[in-house]
Amino acid sequence: MSIRTLFVDDSPETLEALNLLYGSFREIAVVGQAVNFSEAKSFLQSTRIDLISIDIQMGTENGFDLCSYVHFHYPDIFIVMCSIEFNEKNNECAQKCGAHRFLSKPVRSHDIQELLDGYQEFRCARESGNSDDELAWMENLLARC
Amino acid sequence: MPELISRIKHWFFRDDSSVLATTTLTPAVQHSTRETDTPTIRHGTVSISNNRILVTNPDTEGSYAAIRIPSSPVLTVTIDGQTVIGQTIVHKGQDIKFTFKNVPASRKFSLSVSKDSMAVICKVQVVVGEKYRLQDVNNTRYAVLELELQKVYPDPLSVEEIVSQLAEVYKGELEEEQLSYLCGVKQTQEAVVLRGVPPIPGKPVRYKPVKLPRVYDPTQRRMRVCTVPVGTTIAVVEPGIPGVPGRDVFGNEILSTTTDRLPKLGRGVTEVNGQIVAISNGRLIYTKNHIDVVPELTVVHDLSSKDGKIEFDGNVVVLGSVLDGSSIKATGTVEVLGSILCSTVMGEQGVFVSKSIVGSQVVAGQSRLLYKEFIPLIKRCLKEFEHFQTEYVELIGHAEKQYYSKDRLARVADLLLAGRHPSLGRLLSALVAHDTDLTQTDDRLRHIVTTIRSKWTGIGRTNITELDVVYLHQILSEYVTHLDSAVSVETSDVKAGSVTSSSIRASGKIKITGEGVYASSMEAGDAALIKGSVRGGFIVSENRVHLQELGSPVGAETSVRVLNEKGKITARGRHPNTLLQVGSHRNRNFATEHNTTFRGEH
């Protein structure tokens, strides 16, 4: 099943490049692009999204605000912060706001591949929910044989 | 009166020699015999000849001769057994002896061997002797002893002596001329006197190309070998000539080395009876590393989606443009004389576009790139499998103690995968789902995928034995070992005039010779060389990026990265809001810069 992806970035050239990069992966279907918070918000309300890539600096708007909004309202969406400003402070801030990955520009195919692995783990964790009982795992497993 | 005048004249103009004689001071050194004042007085004299002194005594009215003895470390003068220095008178009865500290001359030789044991060096050390003598003095009343130094050279060495010493230990060719010269040298010198026999290198095996007819290619504007039919002889094998071993000065044999560097033969040629023969029709490729005949597909018109998807085992040449919706995949090179528009083009050996690439995906060296992406996946899979195997062995041991039946034991792997190793399950699925191109060409991978599909996915997972677990681990680890060395070292390039809104990937270099790159993603395995400007998008390269102009005056966000810490990025002009990264060093600018060179070490 394709991973429905939305890009949010105020730079049209970056949107174009991200489109090309993500689009080269068969698992990903790019379904939309937004240049600011309000466009992204209205898109999310109308279209189901699996993965969202958000830029930090979007003119006067702050990408972390959108990240927090998506994390709160759409917890099933895998959030990726993608920015030219990559540093420890931004990384920490992104994690606090609920981002699952931070990609620094320029983005490579290898980064997208790792992102997809992270997305799969996120998806499985959401679906399974509970962690195993470490003490009785053998007995539990064998009891199910 | 005349007598008086003559007397006066005589008195005024008389000879003053007698006055001078009485007032002249006797000189300190007298080296010549002077006449005595009067013929009747005889003074004492001293003569020195051949280091022997002869003294004569004066008569009663004469004076004794004197000598001056210098203080010298090399001369000792004893008079009647007493060492004398300074001025002293001498007479006939004295026993005057001279003793000289002469330095004897000497000559000796030593032999040494060069580092490579191919030469014996003889060093002759010469010590020049010193022999002193007194300057001869002839019948003088006062003599100052003066020393004269004579250099004494040692006797020449005997050539036979050196040769006999050489023959005791060493073997080789004697340098007789050098030896004779050394025996007679007058100062310390060394020279090679014996040489080993150097090995004579052989001639390696080589392919000698056969002259094939050439025709003028208007697209490339040069003479090229036209396509060759099957059975054409491309080259002749010239056998090598073995070398002749040498010997060092100890007599040890030195083998002659001959390095055979033959070009690799491709799938389109084979060796038959000492000749390289084409086994398919196609274009001849003859380089120092590679000989092949590659089938060539020439499309004389513009290519469009109506022509269908082109997958060709060989080179593809499009004399027009590649238009919307087209797809080309070639195992050789793809050459497009026009542009590529909204299409997908993959050339294993390279992609060369005369004009523009717009809205397209272009890949050069796709197998190498795929393997590069695939290797981390298979390694991760193996690592996860090893964790799984450890727990599986523990669980099976526990189950066997409880006398579980074979059917129940066969389900253990499935439950363990689902319950505790879901990531391994996903990785195995990803392996199976990975690009089918690799499975078509890679037998080992195809076998692994078949094994996983049959035993480790679907209903087959409920019937996994211990042997199945061991077997999968074995084939995975063997494949990982094989992959590290198997991936081809040859890289492939992409060359184009300009790139717009496209994705370009190459395992080698990306060269853009025209206006530049706009809003695109480029990844190069070696270097990205852009003659024009780069506006927007991402450029990533392994070792180097060179471009003319980065970004735009209005601040289009553009980022460039070199992965190698020792790499560099050079740009003639850099506009604001651009990012450069080499290794882990990043730099973002907010003002225009010129002649930028950015390196990793800062």
Image: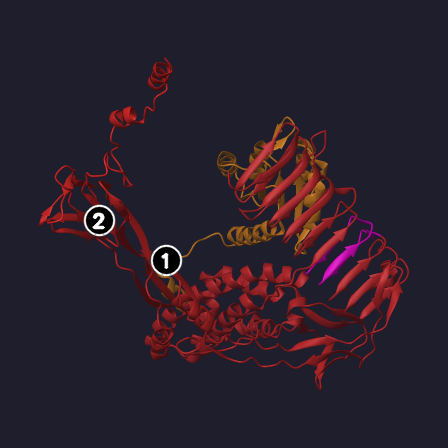
Foreground tag (1 vs 2) = 2
Q: Residue at x 85, y 73 (%)?
A: B213
In the structure shown, which secondary structural element does the residue marked by tag 2 occupy?
loop
Q: Is residue A92 left or right of residue A34?
A: left
Q: Where does the image place residue A45, in percent across and percent down from the top left?
A: 67, 38
In the structure shown, which secondary structural element does the residue marked by tag 1 occupy?
loop
Q: Is residue B590 above or below residue B409?
A: above
Q: Please, which residue is most extreme toward the top here?
A: B1
- Kind of residue at badge 2: Val
Q: Is residue B360 magenta?
A: yes
Region of the chain picked out in magenta, as a range: B339-365
- Kind of residue at badge 1: Glu
Q: Where does the image place residue B432, in percent across and percent down from the top left?
A: 60, 67
Say which of B176 and A14 sits in front: B176
Q: Where does the image place residue B169, in percent across and percent down from the top left?
A: 35, 77
Dot label at residue A134 = 1
Chain under numbered label 1: A
Dot label at residue B74 = 2
The Cα atoms of the two marked residues, 1 and 2, are separated by: 102 Å
Q: Which chain is orange?
A: A
From where the camera sits, is residue A145 visible? Answer: no
Say which of B180 and B138 sits in front: B138
Query: What's the magenta bit mostly, secondary-structure-wise?
Result: strand
Q: Please, which residue is most extreme toward the bottom here?
A: B273
